[in-house]
Image (cartoon, rainbow, N blue to C red):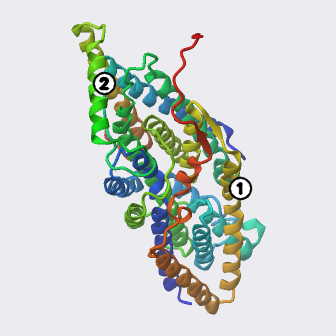
């Protein structure tokens, strides 16, 4: 198969993945402000799209992690081929599609890493993958980031409620957090752009490096950044329209003060990690924050079954996408015919996504994001009355 | 090799940033309420996630806030100080967020 053709194919597929990533993740930033009524859904989606676009330009640390670390390319390493990246992307997209259909919580980022790692393992064997980089930059952040975000959101919620609490029953002004939410959720959308759009940039850069169009270890080209930014912004906007159409199907109970605390901690965690080049899942961080902030409200108890189900979904994504990626790589290793078979599978899956998204029937499992879903992991009593410390 | 220091750095800096933003913003709201200008912000659009606030209820909330403000034991001067404090807190909160963005965008570092 022609070298340039496969490069173009990979770039197109990567951009499509970027689009689905935005499509899938609009709700990460905008589930809480929509739930508390801080923003009109249409406005929220517009803001999310624009800030994702802007965010994509702000930092390229994560892109470098992907293009320059996980798979050993260059001297002493292996020469990853566009065919394998192609297989990895197919793995990621297919797994994303499956989880989406089943309403399983999953992370686009981990699907991507899993797919790539699976493909590399089939193509070159164990020595192709730098497992220490995978462990330190992907797996551990995956486990630690939601916990971090949850802990921070818990603290922040406690603080926000404590500072605004009034024991005399007079109005406490917590409505005012709705205004704050406009800014905090915007920050989350921006952070999403800085982290998630980078992943696709990293993949495209990796492809260009693999065919020698770019020197090993260099960062993403400007046109790559522009394309990825536009793709994720478009995806965000389109995904948002779907959410708007289907609102009212069970977002969880989030109060403005809680939403503000959750969004601030999500944004801070993502931005801090982006800065150090950790490619974490924004979905998981946002979910961690929603759970943490729910626990920070008085009268809350955790529904461990729901929380556990979400956790298992997170852990499954990486290996499962890896298996799909490995299968795709096996097929691709048959030569041009294999690539064509992979492509056909890809096209079927992509049109499947399209058709599914146009279905009129809507259930909470396919509409509500994992973030909103994770809110149900915390059970909160309705408005417990404030009790003054020391009162009888 | 696992860079535990980097994780601690992420935890520490994210916690610090969040706490600063949340404390200043919450204090701002508290002071705003103290100054007699309790923010009443009705939801922009109703989803099933929130208790619906009817126009009448919103009006009642405004009335309640006004009544509470009238009963406030603070003098006008004290209220002005509180209002100034509230605005300063909101400004600080916004500034903290902007500094955070500045810190993570390498391109900006050359400009300032």
- Relative side of B43 to A130, left or right: left
Query: Is A38 positioned to the left or the right of A15 in the image?
Result: left
Q: Quadrant of the N terminus of chain A?
A: bottom right
- Residue A30 seen: yes
Callout 2 crowding tier (Cα within 10 Å): few <14, some 14–19, many ≥20? some
Left or right of B84, for residue B11: right
Which residue lies under the disc numbered 2? B64
Q: Quadrant of residue A391?
A: top right
Q: Secondary structure at mark 2?
A: helix
What crowding class fits label 1: few (fewer than 14 Cα within 10 Å), some (14-19), or many (20 or more)?
few
CA–CA distance in space, label 1 to label 2: 47 Å
Measuring 25% from the left and 15% from the top, which residue is drawn there? B70
Given residues A334 and A145, the one toward you in this image is A145
Secondary structure category for the residue under label 1: helix
- Tell me where residue B39 appears, x and y as whole percent: 31, 29
| Residue located 63% across and 93% down the image | A337
Say which residue appears at 48% left-offset and 36% top-offset.
A258
Q: Is residue A215 visible?
A: no
Q: Quadrant of residue A124?
A: bottom right
Looking at the image, which is closer to me, A129 or A269? Answer: A269
Q: Residue at x 60, y 86 (%)?
A: A339
For label 1, the residue is A312
Whether the residues at callouts 1 and 2 have beta carbons within 8 Å, the answer is: no
The total of numbered circles placed on residues is 2
Q: Is residue A8 above or below residue A70?
A: below
Q: Chain of mark 2?
A: B
The residue closer to the viewer here, A201 or A295, is: A295
Q: Position of residue A93 (x, y in %)?
A: 57, 72
Mark 1 vs mark 2: in front = 2
Residue furthest to the bottom: A337
Q: Is residue A191 above or below residue A74?
A: above
């Amino acid at each position: 198969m022609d070298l340039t053709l496969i490069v173009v194919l990979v770039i197109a597929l990567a951009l499509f993945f970027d689009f689905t990533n935005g499509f899938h993740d609009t709700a990460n930033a905008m589930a809480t402000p929509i739930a508390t009524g801080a923003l009109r859904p249409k406005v929220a989606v517009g803001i999310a799209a624009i800030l994702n676009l802007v965010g994509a330009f702000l930092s390229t640390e994560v892109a470098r992690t992907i293009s320059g670390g996980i798979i050993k390319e260059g001297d002493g390493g292996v020469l990853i081929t566009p065919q394998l990246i192609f297989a990895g992307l197919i793995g990621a997209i297919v797994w994303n599609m499956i989880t989406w259909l089943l309403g399983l919580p999953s992370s686009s980022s981990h699907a991507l890493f899993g797919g790539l790692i699976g493909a590399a393992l089939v193509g070159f064997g164990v020595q192709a993958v730098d497992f220490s980089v995978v462990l330190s930059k992907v797996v551990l952040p995956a486990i630690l980031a939601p916990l971090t975000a949850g802990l921070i959101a818990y603290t922040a919620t406690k603080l926000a409620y404590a500072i605004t609490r009034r024991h005399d029953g007079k109005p406490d002004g917590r409505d005012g957090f709705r205004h704050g939410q406009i800014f905090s959720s915007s920050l989350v959308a921006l952070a999403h752009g800085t982290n998630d759009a980078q992943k696709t940039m990293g993949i495209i850069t990796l492809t260009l490096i693999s065919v020698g169009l770019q020197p090993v270890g260099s960062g993403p080209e400007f046109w790559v950044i522009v394309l990825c930014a536009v793709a994720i912004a478009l995806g965000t906007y389109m995904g948002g329209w779907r959410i708007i159409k289907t609102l009212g199907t069970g977002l969880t109970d989030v109060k403005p003060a809680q939403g503000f605390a959750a969004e601030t901690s999500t944004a801070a965690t993502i931005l801090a990690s982006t800065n150090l080049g950790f490619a974490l899942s924004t979905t998981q961080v946002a979910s961690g924050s929603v759970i943490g902030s729910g626990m920070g409200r008085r009268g809350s108890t955790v529904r461990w079954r729901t929380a556990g189900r979400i956790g298992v979904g997170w852990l499954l994504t990486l290996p499962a996408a890896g298996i799909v990626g490995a299968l795709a790589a096996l097929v691709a290793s048959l030569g041009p015919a294999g690539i064509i078979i992979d492509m056909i599978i890809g096209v079927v899956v992509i049109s499947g996504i399209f058709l599914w998204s146009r279905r009129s029937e809507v259930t909470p499992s396919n509409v509500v994001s994992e973030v909103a879903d994770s809110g149900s992991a915390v059970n909160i009593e309705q408005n417990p009355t404030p009790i003054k410390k020391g009162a009888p | 090799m696992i860079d535990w220091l980097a994780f601690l750095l992420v935890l520490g800096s994210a916690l610090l940033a969040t706490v600063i933003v949340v404390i200043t913003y919450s204090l701002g709201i508290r002071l705003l309420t103290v100054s007699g200008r309790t923010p009443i912000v009705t939801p922009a659009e109703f989803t099933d996630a929130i208790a619906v606030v009817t126009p009448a209820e919103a009006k009642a909330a405004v009335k309640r806030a006004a009544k509470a403000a009238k009963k406030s034991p603070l003098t006008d001067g004290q209220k002005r100080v509180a209002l100034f404090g509230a605005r300063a807190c909101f400004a600080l909160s916004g500034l903290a967020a902007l500094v955070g963005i500045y810190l993570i965008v390498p391109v900006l570092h050359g400009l300032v």
